[in-house]
């Protein structure tokens, strides 16, 4: 093929890229160019094809049609990217939506693992120093000797980014990097990215958070149903316009706060304590109540016990002290199955790790709560046909985008996996007489603005039906808008319980940092 | 420039599977042909003799089915455990434990409890139950060690094989040895009430037991809540716990089924073929069952097909040694080559080979 163009500042150009999966047109003839020294945001609804497009660029998938060209010597040349390894040789590296680190290895080992030309005998100290230096240069302090499982999510992400930088990438792709970060960590990441583009690197970053796009990015491309519907300068657009481009309509107002009376107490924790996997205290004497018709927000920086709260309430983790009551009945030490029967449902924070069995079909996954009872169960037997019928109902009611119930759950887009879990859990909650206890951990993480809207509306609807929602979230705006009360966690303790009407984001920030309310 | 890469397939169609299988066989047969040429034999003649030896006539087919019977059962045993990612490689020992228990019933119950009617309707069920129970106990120890203490089941099930095999050898060489056996190792022959009925030649009811077991396991896998739970645990244990499935309970139950099936194999072999406890019970059927299960992709009905084909390969391989006078090792090498390439070919069912033409020069 001949050289295409000679635009000097374009680093990567995708022309007419099409990628099909069985029953899905994930990318439909997408054109996209990314300039040197720019942060290019990629926006779009769940399932719009963002991750797929980037996977094509980083060599994970091969396009069915279209070409990818890279700048070299001031010219764009078409390349055929054979594999992620080949992509990195060409200077393209990707940090995926789900991290791929080896948890038992150190930072240094993770950074160099799988690289070509690594000597058999490593000079770990020297490599570590090099890695730490790169980290400093880009405002990403890391400790090279630390083991991955000791690190917070934000720190793990730095390791993922370092891994790509260490291999000399000039084009970095970040798939929803801020979905799991705290606002502070997100800001730090923004600074890191700025330093990188100042050196002439290019960054493509996928996000659903319009605020971030507006504050970090130079240009933004919106995908809808696999097509590029617009590429705009950030300075010349607005959040409203972007949202409209993404979902094709205006967003409606957030759901109204509870109107009805508070029902009876559904869940009560009395001085509950538990340990983490390493045997260290993870929850210290937590006392909380959740009433029917109430949304109790749980705020806190990730890793301050929220996950353990969810696990204890759902019976997944034994307590070491205190008591748990569901609807006035003591359920301390109950098994997950007993908690399910008691009407506790759970939207877990780790979708593919806990909420779904990725290789099983969507229908199988949607049946995880209902397979024990009729109509799916008939004695010891399971009616697979009914299972599919039921799955189709959920898919339709909750707008899960998928070719059908037989699709493996893992091949759904991140946001649609989340919708599937929500569909299953909320529906299971309807079985509980007198309202369910809905433990929802980061239920809107990774969802597009339209889907966030509908999830919030669903949760509000469940609240109005008399269920109690334990809403664990990092998004303070979300908590302020939806919760009736907010309990702030720090170091496995409740620092205070406040009503949104009587507090401010600033006060929440202080509580989250460990200052007790006086 | 032209190169190749492997791309993960999103899903594998039946057609692809069959094509891959055919391709693997072709590769194996070509490699085997070279080998046969090297030892001065005609490949066509040898393959013909193998095919004839395995499926060429009534007698041959019967022999192949006799050989397939234990493989169906051990293949199912392994498939059940592997479905849940419980790596039971102890089918061999569980089979032997089952054989010992069935033999014990046949040899000693008539003396210990003469009032038990000595007919097949009573004895065969008793022996089968004893064999299932013994196999299950043999598998249960590793299962409990795994589910309560997290002890790696690969090690424990493997070690338990040797315990069972040594015990079995001790029994038929020592305490259970037939005093009227002219010094040959082996127990006395069972009474006729402890023989599995035969259809023709050595072909016995064990085959039917295997077929019924395959259908039952298939029903468990595809039509029951339990099968759903097993698949869930196999795919994602955390998700299974989250769904309220007790992993502990399922490890125990699955191992009872898996090891019970292996134990039943032991019963089928002693009551159907040897009619006594003697050398020849521990002939790697338990280990070959792993290959059967794997080639059948853990699908219970495919286990039957694979077991019969593999038995044909084993019987046919033995045949060419006899009819063509080739060195004994040749048959085994051919068997090995076929297995290796079929197992290795599996990678092409999971990955797609793509040819790459590099259009631009890169660094
Ligand atoms: N491996 C796969 N097999 C089959 N279909 C797939 C696969 N990966 C993605 N898809 C489908 O392609 C479409 C685009 O998915 P993709 O993951 O690119 O979406 P996305 O824009 O990243 O969404 P999200 O914001 O939810 O992460 C979806 O309909 C998805 O179901
Ligand atoms: Mg995605």
Image (cartoon, grey):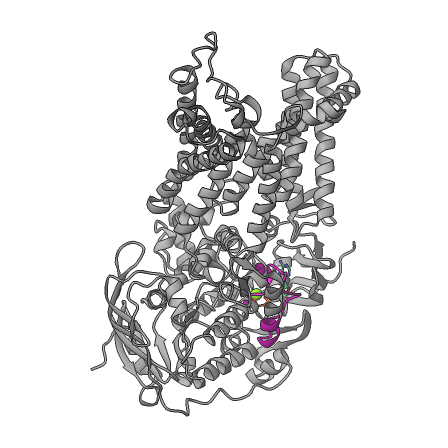
> As rendered, which of B284 and A228 lies closer to the eye?
B284
Q: How many marks?
A: 0
Judged left or right of residue A272, residue A168 is right
Residue B245: horizontal and vertical position, in percent?
43, 57
* Residue beneath the point at 47% across and 56% down: A160
Q: Is residue A374 magenta-colored? A: no
* Residue beneath the point at 53% across and 42% down: A116
* Residue beneath the point at 28% across and 81% down: A497
Residue B34: horizontal and vertical position, in percent?
73, 20
Q: Quadrant of the N terminus of chain B?
A: top right
Judged left or right of residue B91, residue B142 is left
Q: Is residue A395 magenta-colored? A: yes
Compared to B162, does A299 lie above or below?
Answer: below
Does residue B354 appear anywhere in the picture? no
> Looking at the image, in which quadrant does ligand 1 appear?
bottom right
Residue B281: horizontal and vertical position, in percent?
51, 24
> From this viewpoint, which residue is outermost toward the left?
A518
> From this viewpoint, which residue is outermost toward the top?
B182
Q: Quadrant of residue A314?
A: bottom left
Judged left or right of residue B70, residue B148 is left
Q: Which residues are magenta?
A: A393-414
Compared to A386, does B205 lie above or below?
Answer: above
> As rendered, which of B355 and A317 lies closer to the eye?
A317
Compared to B10, does A237 lie above or below?
Answer: below
> As rendered, which of B116 and B13 lies closer to the eye?
B116
Q: Quadrant of residue A45?
A: bottom right
Residue B319: horizontal and vertical position, in percent?
69, 18
> As rendered, which of A131 and A5 lies closer to the eye?
A131
């Amino acid at each position: 093929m001949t050289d295409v163009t000679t635009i000097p500042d374009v680093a990567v150009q995708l022309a007419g890229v099409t990628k099909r999966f069985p029953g899905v047109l994930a990318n439909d003839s997408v054109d996209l160019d990314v300039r040197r020294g720019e942060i290019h945001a990629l926006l779009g609804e769940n399932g719009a094809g963002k991750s797929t497009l980037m996977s094509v660029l980083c060599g994970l998938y091969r396009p069915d049609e279209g070409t990818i060209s890279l700048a070299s010597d001031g010219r764009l040349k078409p390349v055929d990217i054979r594999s992620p390894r080949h992509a990195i040789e060409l200077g393209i590296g990707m940090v995926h939506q789900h991290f791929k680190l080896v948890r038992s290895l150190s930072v240094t080992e993770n950074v160099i693992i799988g690289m070509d030309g690594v000597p058999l005998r490593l000079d770990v100290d020297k490599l570590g120093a090099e890695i730490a230096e790169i980290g400093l240069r880009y405002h990403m302090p890391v400790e090279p000797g630390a083991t991955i499982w000791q690190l917070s999510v934000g720190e793990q992400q730095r390791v993922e980014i370092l891994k790509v930088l260490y291999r000399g990438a000039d084009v970095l792709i970040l798939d929803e990097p801020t979905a799991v970060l705290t606002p502070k960590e997100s800001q730090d990441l923004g600074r890191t990215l700025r330093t990188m583009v100042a050196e002439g690197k290019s960054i493509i970053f996928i996000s659903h958070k319009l605020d971030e796009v507006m504050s970090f990015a130079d240009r933004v491309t919106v995908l809808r149903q696999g097509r590029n519907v617009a590429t705009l300068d950030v300075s010349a657009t607005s959040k409203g316009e972007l949202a409209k481009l993404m979902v094709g309509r205006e967003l409606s107002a957030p759901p109204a706060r509870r109107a009805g009376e508070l029902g009876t107490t559904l869940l009560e924790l009395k001085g509950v304590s538990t340990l983490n996997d390493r045997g260290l205290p993870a929850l210290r004497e937590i006392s909380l109540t959740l009433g029917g018709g109430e949304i109790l927000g749980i705020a806190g920086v990730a890793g301050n016990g929220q996950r353990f709260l969810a696990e204890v309430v759902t019976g997944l983790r034994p307590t070491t002290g205190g008591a748990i009551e569901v609807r006035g009945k003591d359920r301390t030490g109950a098994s997950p199955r007993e908690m399910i029967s008691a009407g506790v449902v759970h939207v877990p924070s780790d979708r593919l790790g806990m909420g779904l069995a990725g290789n099983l079909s969507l229908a199988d996954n949607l049946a995880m709560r209902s397979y024990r009872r009729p109509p799916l169960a008939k004695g010891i037997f399971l009616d697979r046909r009914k299972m599919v019928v039921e799955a189709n109902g959920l898919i339709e009611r909750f707008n899960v985008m998928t070719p059908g119930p037989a699709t493996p759950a893992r091949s759904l887009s991140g946001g649609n996996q989340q919708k599937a879990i929500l569909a299953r859990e909320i529906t299971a909650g309807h079985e509980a007489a007198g309202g369910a206890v809905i433990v929802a951990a980061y239920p809107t993480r990774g969802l597009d603005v339209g889907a966030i809207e509908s999830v919030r509306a669903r949760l509000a609807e469940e609240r109005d039906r008399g269920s109690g929602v334990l809403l664990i979230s990092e998004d303070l705006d979300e908590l302020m808008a939806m919760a009736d009360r907010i309990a702030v966690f720090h170091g496995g303790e409740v620092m205070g319980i406040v009503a949104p009407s009587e507090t401010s984001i600033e006060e929440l920030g202080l509580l989250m940092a460990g200052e007790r309310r006086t | 420039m032209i190169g190749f890469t492997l791309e993960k397939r999103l899903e594998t169609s039946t057609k692809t599977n069959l094509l891959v299988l055919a391709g693997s066989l072709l590769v194996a047969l070509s490699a085997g042909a070279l080998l046969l040429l090297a030892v001065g034999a005609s490949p066509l003649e040898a393959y013909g003799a193998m095919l004839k030896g395995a499926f060429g006539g009534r007698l041959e087919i019967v022999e192949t089915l006799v050989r397939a019977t234990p493989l169906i059962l051990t293949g199912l045993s392994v498939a059940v455990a592997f479905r849940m990612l419980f790596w039971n490689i102890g089918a061999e020992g569980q089979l032997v434990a089952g054989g010992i228990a069935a033999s014990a019933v046949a040899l000693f119950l008539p003396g210990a409890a003469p009032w038990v009617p000595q007919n097949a309707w009573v004895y065969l069920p008793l022996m089968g139950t004893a064999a299932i129970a013994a196999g299950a106990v043999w598998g249960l120890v590793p299962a409990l060690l795994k589910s309560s203490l997290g002890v790696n089941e690969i090690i424990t099930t493997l070690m338990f094989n040797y315990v069972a095999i040594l015990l079995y050898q001790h029994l038929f060489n020592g305490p259970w040895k037939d005093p009227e056996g002219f010094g040959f190792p082996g127990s006395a022959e069972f009474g006729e009430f402890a023989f599995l009925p035969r259809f023709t030649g050595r072909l016995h009811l064990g085959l039917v037991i295997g077929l019924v077991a395959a259908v039952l396991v298939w029903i468990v896998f595809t039509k029951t809540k339990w099968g759903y739970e097993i698949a869930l645990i196999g795919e994602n244990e955390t998700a299974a716990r989250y769904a309220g499935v007790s992993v502990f309970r399922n490890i125990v139950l699955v191992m009872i089924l898996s090891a019970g099936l292996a134990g039943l194999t032991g019963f089928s072999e002693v009551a159907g073929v040897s009619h006594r406890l003697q050398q020849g019970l521990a002939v790697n059927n338990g280990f070959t069952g792993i290959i059967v299960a794997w080639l059948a992709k853990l699908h219970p009905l495919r286990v039957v097909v694979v077991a019969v084909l593999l038995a044909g390969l084993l019987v046919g391989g033995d045949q060419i040694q006899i009819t063509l006078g080739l060195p004994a090792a040749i048959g085994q090498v051919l068997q090995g080559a076929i297995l290796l390439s079929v197992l290795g070919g599996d990678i092409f069912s999971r990955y797609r080979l793509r040819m790459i033409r590099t259009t631009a020069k890169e660094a």
